[in-house]
Amino acid sequence: MEVTLSMDPLFLAWSCFRRRKFQKCSDLCTKVLEDNPYDQAAWSLKTRALTEMVYIDEVEVDQEGIAEIMLDESAIAQVARPGTSLRLPGTSQGGGPTPAVRPVTQSGRPITGFVRPSTQSGRPGTMEQAIRTPRTANTARPVTSASGRFVRLGTASMLTHPDGPFINLSRLNLAKYAQKPNLSKTLFEYIFHHENDVKNALDLAALATEHAQFKDWWWKVQLGKCYYRLGLYREAEKQFRSALNHQEFVDTYLYLAKVYQRLDQPITALNLFKQGLDHFPGEVTLLTGIARIHEVMNNITSATEYYKDVLKQDNTHVEAIACIGSNHFYTDQPEIALRFYRRLLQMGVYNCQLYNNLGLCCFYAQQYDMTLSSFERALALVSSDEEQADVWYNIGHVAVGIGDLTLAYQCFKLALAFNNDHAEAYNNLAVLELRKGHIEQAKAFLQTAASLAPHMYEPHFNFAVLSDKVGDLQSSYMSAQKSEDAFPEHVDTQQILKTLRQHFSVL
Amino acid sequence: MSSVPMEMKDSAVSSSKWLDAHYDPVANLYTFSSCITLADLHGDGENKLVVGDLGTGAGNMKLKVYRGTGLLSENTLLDLPTGLVSFLMDQHEPRTPAIAVASGPFIYIYKNLRPYFKFTLPNLEVNPLEQDVWNQARGDMIDPLTLKEMLEGIRDKADIPLSVRSLRFLMLEPQEMESYVNLHKQQPIRRQTVITCIGTLKKNMADDDAVSCLVIGTESQDIYILDPEAFTILSKMSLPSVPTLMDVTGQFDVEFRIIVACRNGNIYVLRRDSQKPKYCIELSSHPVGLVRMGKNVVVGCAEETMQSFTQKGKKLWTTYLPAPVTTMALLDLPTRGFQAILVALANCEVHVYRDKNIVSTIKTQDVVTSICFGRYGREDGTLIMTTKGGGLIVKILKRTAVFDDKDSISGPPIAQSIRLNVPKKTKLYVDQTMRERENAVAMHRAFQMDLSRLRLAAARAYVKALESSLTPMSTSLTEPLKMNAVVQGLGPSFKLTLNIQNTAACRPVMNLAISFLYDENLYSMRTAFFKIPLLVPGLNYPIDTFVECLSDKGISDIIKVFVLREGKSTPLLTAHINMPVSEGLALN
């Protein structure tokens, strides 16, 4: 108490802010403002503290919500040229592993080594698919709409202020604040991040940039952010371009690339990143951006090259290490993947997924003594039912590998117990049931797997084989056709289709 | 010629043997090769294209005549045409051919594009039992239901099949029977057959402008040869099966051969002096196209092959095609002494074969369904095709085109020289195998110990899951069930669909109920308990219910679903549904 009495409260609040004790800082500012409501310094500091509490990095990739995906009114060519669109799966430039080796996501892209927004979802084909996918926060699958999520963040911060908001936006004279550069910037960030009122933020930014005679690049970037949030991508592009003319800045490049990805112009985005790299050689975020685009466009080999470039600059980049590791794993070099995952472990990443991957790598690289202990660790570290289901599923794979089908059966069933929507487990369980001769059960499981994951070719193919064996050639043919749709190059499907066609045509 | 797309002109014309004369993608022509022919209808030396258009299949059937690129005339047809030929029926001048359109049991003859004569196939013998039954119905001695029963009895046993009227009657709903019987009982029963294919045969001279007879194949497995002037039946032959495709050569008064492909997959060769087929060729799959080249028969089969036989049934060769055959025709250029086979394929290509060697390939814009080669207008080598989408394509064979026979590609298949992308074994891998070799025993022991521990852990977790019925499928012998749940919606109201399936082989499951367990502060359910109907094995039963999210704080919870059996407290199945966060805000 002695200390606080002797210290200037504003200075103390400033010190708290620098030590990232935002709540305390805001409380102190509130006290100062109670004494003197017109203290601009305290007011500004409080807005900054409140903003920092809910600040999210706008530069990072964000998800396209259902509204943006399904209600996209900009018509695109139905058949884009190969390698120019993010929306069409299968516009692969070759060289990547097939779905038989590397599992694919719903949109038909190979799964990545690092879960970030929009890596798992892609574009669902139908509204039905879009609203059915689970959308819990931890699965990183499509959220309904970006604005919905931001509103939620906003309301969460409102809960801490039971006696009303700090600034009443509707009574604010934006034109007055726009004249004061020292206040307007913090006020803008407060409106944009804390209140999530993009419309007012846009008004303020427009007034402020006018006051700065359209020469302040910062305001242009903020205008672009507002336009982006509102879905006005062409306007956002204009603002960012103009800001880049004033001042070359990494963030602006990233924002602009985000706009181009939204506009489905991956090639332009790539060119922009390369342009950015000319000004900022070796910039990690730009390199990562390039690698991500290559990855989304199924060009895994180039993606790996760029991730390697990232590692040359920043050898602790988790995403790059994980992606290169998973690429090595799926290109039949588990021993190298093991190296990368061990590196992650040395860096202090200590979670269920990593141990799970280590276990798989050890198993496929024939380091059997470490395989199962890794899985045990993974099981001990699980934080959700989905993770537990995935670990049991992978243990099931190991059990199939060593021929212990009882254990495999138990593991796949456990995977299903923890995650009822685990289509892969349903499929594998069906195969085990079929080996036991339980045809009805196998059929039911395969049908469930097919309905849960229409993008997987395995359930369809297995169903075709099963029906073929039972003698139901019509269903076999239909399933084989679905399997062909999901994975056109699958040789076994082609073969079964060929024999069926022959069967149908022969007298 | 304006409708030819630009890029096609550029790329195709320079190298191809064909000139693109006309392409109309919306000509609205739906037809097959049997209903298309080229004839000099007006005797002015200019050949017209005559098409029997099938329209929509239910209506809008037309007889269309094209001249150049334009439609010359259109006549409405009463029924679907099954075949169309042009033939000279008399010696009168000017020598203009007549058009015969076969549809149903009739042949309509058109002269100068006006209806001229209608020929009806002779009636077939009616089953006397059927006649009796209908006589009784006429005398109101039996009611429609008895009539139905008796007709069904006749249908199952009799050698002579029922008439169309009786068959139609058997299809009716009980309430419609009475009026149907009253409407038809006074008329005598007739049994008619329908025409399946039609061809022409020169009467007594081999000249191009000689008088021809009509040769028709019918559903009753007969072949009739008709006199061109009086339309009397000159000859009747019977086949073991229903003819579908036909080729005729020779002259009726001298010697002729009729090659018929039948619905049982056999090809029969008929000759002048025999009532029964002389030779039979048994195919391995259904014939799709039949073309005679000189003395040989070339057949396109449903199993994507083309086979050639002599007329005595000796097989000459087989070619494998890249796609199923849609139709076939003969390319005959008598002025240059060139004959080849045109094969239209389902992959939008038309191949020209000379014997078994491919000499030219034409890419088309759509799948070709009918094809015809001959003199059109004043041009001798014209190829006319209509497509599945109703388009009309006309191509002209270049006079400078040379077809050179090249034997099909020989040598090793290309796949032999493709290198597989097998990653190299890394040094790391070699090091690790060294380690494995040196510490084999220790590694094995560690693995075995871990394995037993893991088996124990798995078994424990499995038992726990079984005891609390956590798995979404039950394996009990009496109720083998499987359930999965789907949540739809953005919130605050969600639709919860439970898919329940009985996986038993044959035993139904009954007396089941479903109940839910959830936080009542967070969710409300319209019905939190309901009974399941009897579950038939193998069928999927979707059961819907609606969940309302009461909180607006962006919190989500688990809803537990239990499938219960009446009289037992432990659930058979449990499913945990991770509810999505409610994105929508409830209106206050």
Image (spheres, rainbow, N blue to C red):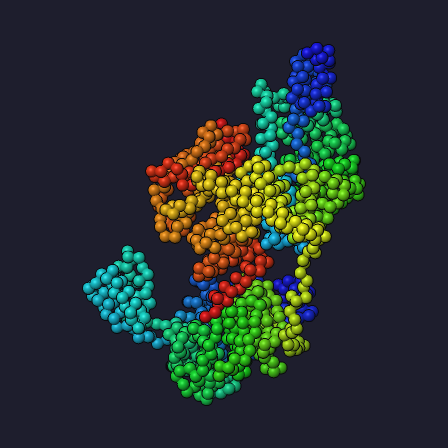
Relative to A376, A319 lies left or right: right
**x then y, percent, for residue B55:** 47, 64
**x then y, percent, for residue A73:** 60, 44
Relative to A279, A365 lies left or right: left
Q: Quadrant of the N terminus of chain B?
A: bottom right
Q: Which one is nearer the viewer's eye here, A50 or B117?
A: A50
**x then y, percent, for residue A182:** 74, 23
Residue at 58% over, 65% down: B348
Q: Is residue B130 positioned above or below A347 on the image?
A: below
Residue at 59% over, 71% down: B351
Asked if residue B52 can be seen in this view, the reply is no
Asked if residue A41 can be seen in this view, the reply is yes
Residue at 59% over, 82% down: B334
Residue that protrudes farthest toward the front in the picture = B441
Q: Which one is nearer the viewer's eye here, A326 or B338?
A: A326
Q: Which one is nearer the viewer's eye here, A124 or B73?
A: A124
Q: Is residue A37 positioned above or below A149 on the image?
A: above
**x then y, percent, for residue B335:** 61, 82
Q: How many marks?
A: 0
Residue at 52% over, 73% down: B300
Q: Is residue A309 positioned above or below A185 on the image?
A: below
